[in-house]
Amino acid sequence: MIQDTRQIFKSHCWDFVNEVYNKAGFPNKARKNVYMTKIAGPYADPELVKPGDWLYITHLNTLNDHSVLFISWVDSNKKDWANVADYVGGKRTDTGRLQKKYCGQIWGIIRVK
């Protein structure tokens, strides 16, 4: 679903991560909330995050939210920038992508049970 032109999305970032979980065989009943609060925080301890987690993040210096699939920390000591899989969102026609994203403000963590 990443950079595969047969997997074009025209939806939202949440829908992309939800579809990744569904295609991997983990529908809603196979998921659990590890941490969930409000977009303005308080934010999760980054030590809670594991590869494969669905993160709800607040964009740096804004109150705009975004959903990403966590892969790894860019710097395992700092734990603020992460390698993620995501979709640009905003109903733009595009594929998923791999990128570095600021994840220092995590307000939700969903994980496979």
Image (tube, rainbow, N blue to C red):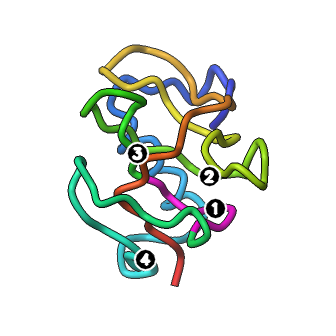
What element does badge 1 sit on?
loop
Residue at which label 1 appears: 52
Q: Is residue 34 above or below residue 66?
A: below
What predominant SS class does the magenta segment belong to? loop
**Tag 1 or tag 3, which sits nearer the N-term?**
1
Q: Nearer the viewer, mark 3 or mark 2?
A: 3
Q: CA distance from mark 2 to mark 1?
A: 5 Å
Q: Quadrant of residue 101?
A: top right
**Tag 1 or tag 4, which sits nearer the N-term?**
4
Instruction: Name the amino acid, label 3.
Output: Ile
Residue 65 part of the magenta segment:
no
Q: Which residues are magenta?
A: 49-55
Residue at which label 4 appears: 34
Query: What residue is rendered at 29% in x and 27% in y?
Result: 62
Query: What residue is rendered at 62% in x and 52% in y?
Result: 70
What element does badge 2 sit on?
strand
Q: Nearer the viewer, mark 3 or mark 1?
A: 3
Query: What residue is rendered at 24% in x and 48% in y?
Result: 39
